Amino acid sequence: MKDVLKVAGREFSSRLFLGTGKFPSVKALHDSIVESGVEVVTVALRRVDLNNPNDGIISAIDRKKQLLLPNTSGARTAEEAVRLARLSRAAGCGDWIKLEVTPEPRYMLPDGIETLKAAEILVKDGFIVLPYMNADPMLAKRLEEAGCAMVMPLGSPIGSNKGLKTIDAVKIIIEQSNIPVVVDAGLGAPSDASLAMEIGADAVLINTAIAVAGNPPMMARAFADAVRAGRMAYLAGLGAKSDYANASTPVVGIPNVQ
Amino acid sequence: MKVIINDKEHVFDLKELALIDMLNKVNMKPTGLIVELDGMILKSNEFTDAVVKDGSRVELIRIVGGG
């Protein structure tokens, strides 16, 4: 069965998106991309350090196979996010932008008001906008109405590895959304990614959990497998939950034991 | 002339300088580089014609790993 993710007219067969920060080496990142078969990789824009200008990250990415998805990380306001998006497009990174506005550094939670403001500007400007957001079903609807191509609610704070703590709100977002829902941030183990897919998320984005693993390429593969398993379980239809036992073995015809 | 590159002052012994030559002087290769000159984002095919003058502000940005 063909099961593709469609975003803004583009098809993806992998439902795992990979963030490229914090990898121990360019090779570890490259091997993780290859092992997991991801088709979306996020990157960031930063000022060059003139004393240490080398960052060969781009060499790990094959733009024929992977969509380069620049983010606006570091933006604290809508205005800063819009500027980063325009810089990225001018630099040849394309029209896709992962919109992030995170003004406070401790929890790095997204500012929904500034995110919506930036999304409205960027959509008008012709960008394909993928906003990182808190798991807020109303905000998800507003971002969808603004013309975003997907919503990316968080599972828990960025890099926290705490898992899908927002599950109930994410379920509501999935139920109400007419655009893809991609769980981003905080998923720490393949089982977290599988859970997100089992409840019907269209994809997940993982960075820290893979980048900081003892063996990042092996962990990337584990996440890819978990995402496939979770997706398949969702499509297959999970059985209902019950507070009581429901015998799986027939309860009639049990031989008498004398 | 004085040029501000990423908020730091750099002094060059010339009145104006082609952007490409300035990058060379600060040991930067243009490949993969994003340049904003006096608030204008340059396309990579505009690098060759761009000229840096006294008081110019240059932002040099590149793609790094991120989630």
Image: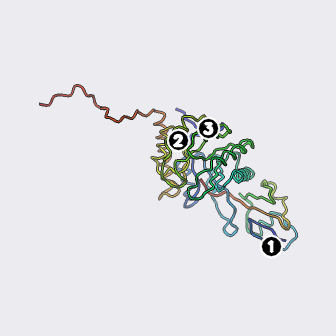
Give percent across and percent down for residue A40.
60, 46
Instruction: Name which residue lies at 60% across and 34% down.
Output: A178
Task: Give the side of residue A230 with respect to residue A64, left or right.
Answer: left
How many discs appear?
3
Q: Nearer the viewer, mark 2 or mark 1?
A: 2
Residue at the image point whose x is 35% and y is 36% from the top: A243
Q: Nearer the viewer, residue A16 or A135?
A: A135
Q: In the drawing, what numbered circle is on residue A170?
A: 2
Rendering colour mode? rainbow
Q: Which mark is residue A141?
A: 3
Relative placement, left or right, of A196 versus A102 is left
**Which label sits on residue B11?**
1
Q: Is residue A26 above or below residue A250?
A: below
Q: Is residue A68 visible?
A: no
Give coordinates of residue A233: x percent, y percent: 45, 37
Disc 3 marks a residue whose amino acid type is: Lys
SS category of the residue bearing label 3? helix
State the residue at coordinates (75%, 43%).
Answer: A125
Mark pair 3, 1: CA separation: 52 Å
Estimate the x, y position of residue B27 in percent, counting from the top left: 73, 68
Going from N to C along the chain, the mark reached first, 2 or 3, is 3
